[in-house]
Image (cartoon, rainbow, N blue to C red):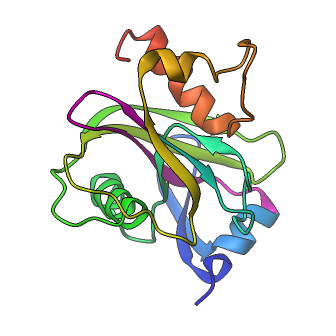
Amino acid sequence: MSASDEVLDVVDEQDRVIGRAPRGEVYARGLIHRCTFVRVRDAEGRVFVHRRTPTKLVFPSLYDLFVGGVVGAGESYDDAALREAEEELGVSGLPRPAFLHKFLYDSGGVAGKWWSAVYEVRCDLPVRPQAEEVAWHAFLTEDELRERLPGAAGAWEWVPDGLAAYERLVADRSW
């Protein structure tokens, strides 16, 4: 099954399930769905950062501060966060990610809106990122990360939903 065929719960502005549809249809029609964002830190406190592959349906080839993805039909945010983190990092046995907050993100016509549940997890395991999802990766220190964020001389092009989640963490002083 391709990513666009994966069935998702369609939700309303209050995050209540109102139906189900394949991911491709959800994106094409701009339907509200659910996603997880997992901030990953290693034993030294460095942040896992990666560049998405060019084959991703949304925001291909951009850098991301989080691993994660869509929540499948009937799946909980918590289960999706753990599943997505383990899949993208290429590990098993991660602790359950800790929930931080949730917000409704509007992609500005790219693929609709999505409820974004943000989590955090520590990964002390050697990572082997999923080749279909991750084109490049590294664990960056806070200083290295700041040098690559918007406004810095060496800024990278980041996924906008990940930046929105990051900005909320900074505003909440959770970062």
Residue under the image location 72 percent in, 57 percent down: 58
Q: Is residue 7 magenta?
A: no
* Res 157 visible: yes
Where residue 80 appears, as percent x and y from the top left, is: 36, 60
For residue 115, side relative to residue 140 (left or right): right
Residue under the image location 62 percent in, 77 percent down: 3
Quarter occupied by the C terminus: top left
- Name the residue furthest bottom: 1
- Name the residue furthest right: 109
Where residue 37 appears, as percent x and y from the top left, is: 45, 44
Span of residues in magenta: 29-48
Quarter occupied by the N terminus: bottom right
Q: Nearer the viewer, residue 126 or 18?
A: 126
Residue under the image location 67 percent in, 62 percent down: 53
Q: Reply above or below: 100 against 170.
A: below
Where residue 104 appears, as percent x and y from the top left, is: 57, 36
